[in-house]
Amino acid sequence: MVDYREVQSPSIIIANKPIGKTPLEIIQLLKQTDKYKSTKMSYAGRLDPMAHGLMIILMNKECFKQHIYHNLNKTYRFKLLLGISTDTFDILGKITKNYLVDTIESIDSTILQLIGTQIQEYPPFSSVRVNKHPLWYYAKHNKLDTITIPSKKVTIYDMIIEDDTTMSHLDLIKYVQNNITKLDTKHDFRQNDILKEWQHIKDLNYRILTINADVSCGTYIRSMCDLIGKKLGVPAIALDIFRTCVGSYQL
């Protein structure tokens, strides 16, 4: 079952979305209980399948106020993995690059450069629509070159590195396998092909940075991780994304 609590009862539910579940599946789980079986529900703000943490579920008349919640700022604690890049910018993607990362001394300054307002492209595997199709449709069918990837203005208010550690390739493979297998097999996220690729990553010690970030609504942490990697000149993805706050709401 989902870990959740009501606030401003009976209008809002603060749910702790686990890894592997989609926002819609969270609502479906809640509706399995007698208490919410007949309740109108909608979620305010998506979380990727591999992301976890705070989700706001609106109930009944509050569902008509989605725009208010969508515009709230967010706080994330995420893990940035150096040495691997994928086509989704997180672990649920096909590996595009994998090589040794030498000592990098400019990480702190690179992250400081990202604080402020910027134009951020949507990640190729995302649900934003272009010509009636979600962006992932074009990515999945190798048609990204037929469209212009949309972008939006976002603001990074603060980013702080909280930890800097390493993980062996065997531990990384186990971590990825444990998380990807949490997905319901009814979803086609290319899980089988992706898991096979992760089995063959290079025998390296992979550097992982834990970062706390305060950002505006609509900011994709996956895209931020990819951008950090590009600025550093190394492959990089989001290993883990945990949303801790939405506006004044906390887990």
Image (cartoon, rainbow, N blue to C red):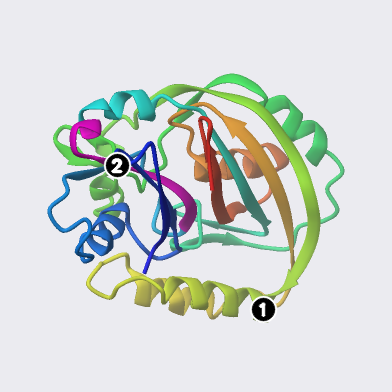
Which residue is at a point 58% across and 74% down the rendered structure image? 175
Dominant secondary structure (helix, strand or loop) of the stretch shown in magenta: strand
Is 106 left, or right, of 130 in this rendering? Answer: right
Q: Check disc 1 and give the amino acid type.
A: Asp
Q: Can you say whether 169 is above or below 223 in the image?
A: below
Q: For numbered disc 1, what is the local secondary structure?
A: helix
- Where is mark 1, residue-wise? 171
Is 239 left, or right, of 101 in this rendering? Answer: left
Q: Quadrant of residue 33?
A: bottom left
Q: Can you say whether 137 is above or below 176 in the image?
A: above
Q: Quadrant of residue 225?
A: top right
> Which range is magenta?
51-63
Distance of label 2 from label 1 (alpha carbons): 43 Å
Measured from the top left, where is residue 123 in percent x and y? 42, 41
Q: Can you say whether 147 is above or below 5 in the image?
A: above
Measured from the top left, where is residue 205 in percent x and y? 76, 70
- Where is mark 2, residue-wise? 10
Judge whether residue 196 is colored magenta: no
Q: For numbered disc 2, what is the local secondary structure?
A: loop
Q: Which mark is residue 45?
A: none
In this view, the residue in front, 20 or 27, is: 27
Mark 2 or mark 1: which comes first in sequence? 2
Is 240 left, or right, of 100 in this rendering? Answer: left
Q: Are marks 2 and 1 in contact (CB under 8 Å)?
A: no
In this view, the residue in front, 232 or 151, is: 151
**Label 2, residues with CA under 10 Å away: few <14, some 14-19, many ≥20:** few
Q: Check disc 2 and give the amino acid type.
A: Pro
Which residue is at a point 23% across and 49% down the rendered structure image? 137
Which residue is at a point 34% across and 32% down the rendered structure image? 149
Measured from the top left, where is residue 55 in percent x and y? 41, 46
Judge whether residue 56 is colored magenta: yes
